Image (cartoon, grey):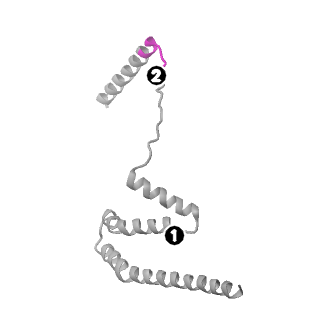
């Protein structure tokens, strides 16, 4: 039984080492391929939109990786939600608006309208004088 526990510990340690090597390899790819292209775009004064467009697929791939592998469930959940929002669209949020004039009587509305028209007319007259 002690042998199985020791072997399990070794396998877990080996798996961690493999993951770290994979991460280093990904970082090398970033430094050799993506970073030089970003620097080139910056030197050429590329628009922010062009830079975002260039990075879009990399960001999406990173988001999917986080969603599928991150140990932090909150971070993984946020990544999943973001992916679903971008691919399926956000859920509609209904809001109901009530206009402040909606409950006014017709006489009050007429009076308000008349006073606003008078103000607008006076403003026009003042602009002509200046």
Q: Earlier in the sequence, mark 2 or mark 1?
A: 1
- Residue occupying the far right of the picture: 2
Q: Is residue 26 above or below residue 123?
A: below
Whether residue 105 appears in magenta in the rendering, the answer is: yes
Checking the image for residue 56, the label placed there is none
Determine whether label 2 and label 1 are within 8 Å by CB: no
Magenta stretch bounds: 101-109
Q: Find residue 54 and report its horizontal and vertical position in percent.
A: 32, 68
Q: Is residue 126 magenta?
A: no
Residue at 36 percent of width and 83 percent of height: 32
In the rendered picture of this protein, how many numbered marks are placed on residues? 2
In this view, the residue in front, 126 or 60, is 60
Question: Given the current orientation, which residue lies at the most extreme top position?
Answer: 107
Vertical placement of residue 63 versus 4, above or below? above
According to the picture, the residue beneath numbered tag 2 turns out to be 101
| Residue 15 occupies quadrant | bottom right
In the visual, does 55 lie left or right of 66? left
Mark 2 packing: few (<14 Cα in 10 Å), some, or many (20+)? few
Left or right side of 100 for 30: left
Q: CA distance from mark 2 to mark 1?
A: 54 Å
In the rendering, at what x and y percent does residue 123 appear?
35, 27
Given residues 52 and 46, the one toward you in this image is 52
Residue at 71 percent across and 85 percent down: it is 1
Q: Residues within 10 Å of mark 1 (few under 14, many from 20)?
A: few
Which residue bears the numbered disc 1? 69
The image shows residue 89 at horizontal and vertical percentages of: 40, 50
**Residue closest to the eye, 46 or 115:** 46
Residue placed at 49% from the left, 19% from the top? 103
């Amino acid at each position: 039984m002690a042998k199985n526990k020791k072997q399990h510990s070794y396998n877990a340690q080996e798996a961690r080492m493999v993951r770290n090597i994979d991460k280093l390899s990904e970082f090398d790819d970033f430094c050799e391929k993506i970073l030089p292209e970003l620097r080139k775009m910056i030197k050429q004064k590329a628009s922010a939109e062009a830079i975002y467009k260039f990075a879009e697929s990399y960001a999406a791939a990173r988001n999917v990786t986080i969603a599928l592998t991150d140990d932090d469930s909150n971070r993984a959940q946020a990544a999943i939600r973001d992916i679903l929002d971008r691919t399926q669209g956000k859920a509609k949020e209904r809001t109901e608006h009530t206009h402040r004039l909606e409950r006014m009587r017709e006489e009050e509305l007429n009076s308000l309208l008349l006073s606003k028209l008078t103000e607008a007319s006076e403003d026009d007259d003042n602009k002509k004088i200046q």
